Amino acid sequence: MVFDLDLIKKTYSEMPAKVDAARKALGRPLTLAEKTLYSHLWKGVEPKDFERGKAYVDFAPDRVAMQDATAQMALLQFDTTGRKKVAVPSTVHCDHLIVAKNEGKQDLVKAVTDNEEVYNFLSSISNKYGIGFWKPGAGIIHQVVLENYAFPGGMMIGTDSHTVNAGGLGMIAIGVGGADACDVMAGLSWELLMPKLIGVKLTGKLNGWTAPKDVILKVAGILTVKGGTNAIVEYFGEGATSMSCTGKGTICNMGAEIGATTSTFGYDESMARYLKATGRAEVADAADAVKEYLTGDAEVYANPEKYFDKVIEINLSELEPHLNGPFTPDLATPISQMKEAAAKNGWPTKVEVGLIGSCTNSSYEDISRAVSLAKQVAEKGLKTKAEFTITPGSELVRYTIERDGYLSTFEKIGATVFANACGPCIGMWDRVGAEKAERNTIVHSFNRNFAKRADGNPNTLAFVASPELVTALAIAGDLTFNPVTDTLTNEKGEQVKLDPPSGDELPTKGFAVEDAGYQAPAEDGSGVVIDVKSDSKRLQLLYSFAPWEGTDLKGLKLLIKAKGKCTTDHISMAGPWLKFRGHLDNISNNMLIGAVNFFNEKTDNVKNQLTGEHGAVPATQRAYKAAGVGTIVVGDENYGEGSSREHAAMEPRHLGVRVVLVKSFARIHETNLKKQGMLALTFDNKEDYDKILEDDTIDVIGLTSFTPGQALQLVLNHADGSSETITVNHSYNAQQIEWFKAGGALNVIRSEFAKA
């Protein structure tokens, strides 16, 4: 089945004229990213040379994808807009709420029972509004999108930061909050800061133990977790075309870990092969007809420094396998240097668990290369030293690798096969012994490795690697094992060396599946009733946030001054809290419980200025709200990096936080704060962060003349009676200021539809 073929053909029929007009308007050759962006300008927006990193531009994405944890809030918001049906093709994917504990079948049965209320809600609301629904067990959103919906030159948004995975099939795919998805599903334009462009030229060819994952691990080490902020990363060169489509997807997937708006590759033969293998030969044929518009102009790739804001060159023939971590995905270590790094940092070198799969690395190629190593365990008389788990990315892949005997090979070395879901990658792993909080090391092929992320244990050191390297390290049980040079001692006491991994890009017998897990929406959903019980602990209907009162904000109390890394995991944890993603008040009980308080180095422990006592962050904020006192949150660099979860913005808004002031924001989180009517500010002088004291009462001055590009003033009223004024900046444009004044973007949408 080919989804949305008419839409794809229409996109391709209009693309040449739109791209040619943009090339003429800019008077120069275009990158691939520019071709896709300019061919998706909102109606009435004329092509011009929009200033990168400065100009806000309205776009018209082709489609929307939502995973079950974020879809709840996105669709609760959409339900209030007055629309009868979504304006663009949209899908919901049930992948985040399945706990990995025993094995796939058992875990799926339990998840369906435990989450029945939420699944029924998502199924019925999808049916009502014309949204495709992928049932629990169908697979991880990004793998399913790549297999069914992604197409070269298309543009999509998704309520998950790893939506960028679809760049592997040549899309501009961008992670957003639910409010952005709501806008697009309601038929409105979608606003984006015109991204800067980073070009990555790949020369040579991957070989031996090196995999596509090592490309992005290397790039993360170069750019760091914030180096890609407000930029699109475009990969090109002979190394790019020599790589598989799913390998490209892996690289784009982890582009989220460098803060990139998205990443993408030009259309090539590997993409055509993948489209045909997944039953979309018609899409490949349509893409072939306009293929020159689905890659960057030749002049761009010949002289990349002229057209990209930054250029990185990586020789794949010389690239080493990498291990990134712990606690941050940009701490990159070539495997040849891990022994030295581990000794220097005191990292535990015994690998307790190796985990492969997730949305980043669960393709047929990934599994086939990993299984080539698993086969060597018996062939070379070895025994796997660490626990080993596999998380298939979709039922299509799981069924096919079972048919081809791969799962039985893994099971022979003691592996556990989890459900087709996110599982450990997003903290849904009921790991035995994690509650003991023992210091230990795990290796995985996922994308993130923040503290507590996988198993809730702050002392678990997680390292990110390719599935091939994870498998080798699980066999060896040693973080410092270098399969390129080292040998292992087998059960007979012999020294043996693992052969480099090998595998098929695509299944030679073709993909197969009995039930992919898709549920088409009703032709007419007008009669579908959405039932949310008033006493539900999982779901809660939304209310409208109050509009701005029209005055400067005065008398704000400091809720917390967060120290160091403060990701969306720190602001709104996943794991066991995922079950409350549809209930704003209940999930708000996790607000900022992972953030480190600058003043006492503790988590979930802040001072209540009204009582002088210290307590949990959510409880303290609820006390301020009950007393009618507004508050401010202060943060460090790249505040809100990580997931796209808008709960990290909605929870503070719901509990009465008025301002978030930081040294710098991650892109998605800053947008989410704006969408919810919050005031997102940055220090003009980052050293002013040190001036914020625990007992400060803070005034925000200048809001009555709030305009784009005009700084605001903050008066810090200290407990000793002194005060000082600092300058703070913002990136609000005129439309975003209207969101703030209205109390949130959704209030503006409601107002506009009420007038229609």
Image (cartoon, rainbow, N blue to C red):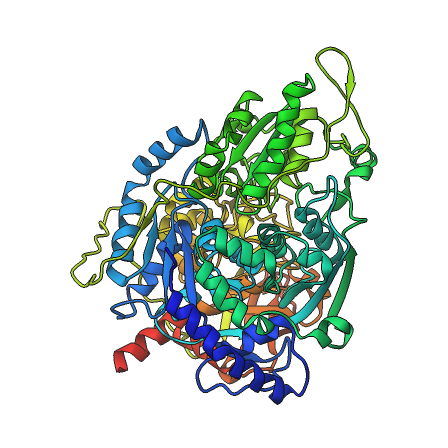
Q: Position of residue 554 (x, y in %)?
A: 50, 71
Q: Position of residue 332 (x, y in %)?
A: 74, 46
Vertical position of residue 39 compared to residue 493: above or below = below
Residue visible at 68% across and 72% down in the picture: 684
Quadrant of the frame with the C terminus: bottom left
Residue 28: image quadrant is bottom right
Quadrant of the frame with the N terminus: bottom left
Q: Position of residue 204 (x, y in %)?
A: 77, 54
Left or right relative to 227: residue 179? left
Residue visible at 39% across and 75% down in the picture: 188
Left or right relative to 598: residue 94? left
Residue visible at 62% across and 60% down in the picture: 259
- 387 or 207: nearer the viewer: 207
- 523 or 418: nearer the viewer: 523
Left or right relative to 549: residue 146? right
Vertical position of residue 748 compared to residue 334: above or below = below
Residue 154 seen in the current view = no
Residue 654 seen in the current view = yes
